[in-house]
Amino acid sequence: MILHKFPCNLKLLPERFKVLRFMTLVLFLSNLVAVYAQTLSIGLAEMVNEAPVLGLTGFSGVTGSIRLAGMNNEAPVSGHTRVLAQNSSTGVVAANTIAEDTSLCSNTRLDSLIPVLMERYKVPGVSCVVIKRGEIVWAGNFGVSDIRKVVPVSDSTTLNAHPKDILPKNSTPVADSTSFETHPKDIQYKNYALVTDSTMFEACSMSKPIFSLVAMKLVEEEKLKLDEPVWKIFDDPSFMGQEWRKKITPRMLLTHTSGLPNWRESKDEENGYLPIEFEPGTRFQYSGEGMYLLQKVVEKLTGEPLEVLAEKLIFSKLGLKNSSFIWRQNLDYKIAAGHNSEGGFLKKTAYTRANAGYSLYCSALDYARVLTAILKSGEKDFGFLLPATVDTIFSRQAESPEREPEKRCGKRNGIKTFRGLGWAIDETEGSLSPSPSPAGEELSRAVNDPEKKVSTLKDEVKGKLHETNKGNVPGDIFYHSGSNSSGFKCYHEFDRQSGSGIVIMTNGVGGLKLCEDIIFLGY
């Protein structure tokens, strides 16, 4: 059940992972009790021709209790837990499923684990999406988007408020009256404060992979060449004539091998001096400035700002309604606030100028839909990206020995890190090859060959793709994390071989440790 997920030697694990391993097993057993109780309640409801109880909440990291809302006319309560939605077709109470698809399966372990980690790391809100076999199978939303919108309940047992302003939509309906009974000192949330499928988090550095897709769409359209020096399109005055600038290419910028620092010391993001710290193309150094430079190149090339290009080339094509590279007034009510290490309000940003390195606002569900689109590239009648483009993006372009691979249990544990175009790549203990992919390298060259059309690449490399699993090494895991000083932490990863992946968005400084624990324990 749970134990097969953890084949690691406990002696080698950090102490917190040992505790988590034991804790997860305990939580799983607790949930078995909850599921049994819910099954019993559904059965009893059917026997008396009543509707099944809708408000079973997950294991609460705040109280350590499981509550069946609706019993004794109680209103459901959501602390660091979330109300579960019922699948009307099966009668089974499952995870907080996506509104337009109630057929998703449950994830009992994450239902239990996430609230506990939220309490441990003081993270007010989390949205998490799991992908299996290339499809979204589970989406869970926990806590609140903005702690300032929490409404404490008074010490009395009656709360006077309009029902529609208090309970989440997927909870047991409140009678049409101006008051209802609730437990003292419990917390209720207004609808708009709850994390939902449409809550938009700061994607932080996870903005970079989405921008890389914008750039690669332009490569497909033969408007941008990966190995052509960018100064020919946009000679950034921030370089102040440094000769090395003439060697920098889009490929180097997307793989963080351009020689640029992460961020310039000057507060002038547009014109402050930007040093080139080593010869471009010779080694890896993570650089947000590199992504921002390529953004300016792309904007000069197309005559359109990044937020417009992303909407046109990515978001509208995939039907993403909760994604934007800039703050917009009409989206503000969906955008979460950031919180500090104690879980208190920190900041709510309004990025009015797009930056490819950090300014994307999006929901976890929208981000997961991008990943499923990537995983489906190559399927019949699915034309988001050409298969050859995806193979190029996820081939091992450069080794990044300075970066530590992610800690995962079993054969998914990272042992060496590479860079693709916009993504980090972990060679894992399950990877079949320790070296860069030959097919991926050939695809990279072919995409930039002016004598060849991108549309013909699929046929040219068909044989090699079968040999190397679509230009990648089987077992490689593609991922990116994100961290903004405004109090947001996030992470995603996926595996093209199995089609599995996860997206985690949080609005608290402690969110990075929460992500690390989930990734280590498995999903």
Image (cartoon, rainbow, N blue to C red):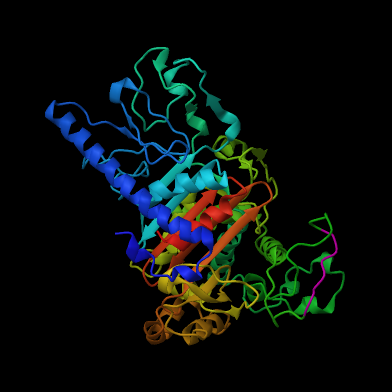
| Magenta segment | 271-278
In the picture as drawn, the residue positioned furthest to the right comes out as 240
Horizontal side, residue 93 vs residue 198: left or right: left
Name the main secondary structure of what is drawn in magenta. loop
Q: Is residue 350 above or below residue 242?
A: above
- Residue 275 lies in the magenta-colored region: yes
Q: Nearer the viewer, residue 263 or 12?
A: 12
Observer able to see residue 254: yes
Q: Is residue 457 above or below residue 56?
A: below
Q: Nearer the viewer, residue 232 or 127?
A: 127
In the picture as drawn, the residue positioned furthest to the left comes out as 47
Q: How many marks?
A: 0
Q: Residue at x 43, y 26 (%)?
A: 167
Residue 267 percent coordinates (x, y): 82, 54
Quadrant where the image shows the N terminus = bottom left
Quadrant where the image shows the C terminus = bottom left
Residue 116 percent coordinates (x, y): 47, 46
Q: Nearer the viewer, residue 384 or 56?
A: 56
In the picture as drawn, the residue positioned furthest to the front comes out as 11
Horizontal side, residue 132 vs residue 261: left or right: left
- Residue 298 lies in the magenta-colored region: no
Residue 450 percent coordinates (x, y): 58, 82
Residue 93 percent coordinates (x, y): 28, 40
- Quadrant for residue 420, please give it: bottom right
Observer able to see residue 381: no
Q: Residue at x 42, y 58 (%)?
A: 21
- Quadrant for residue 182, please give it: top left
Q: Is residue 84 above or below residue 75?
A: below
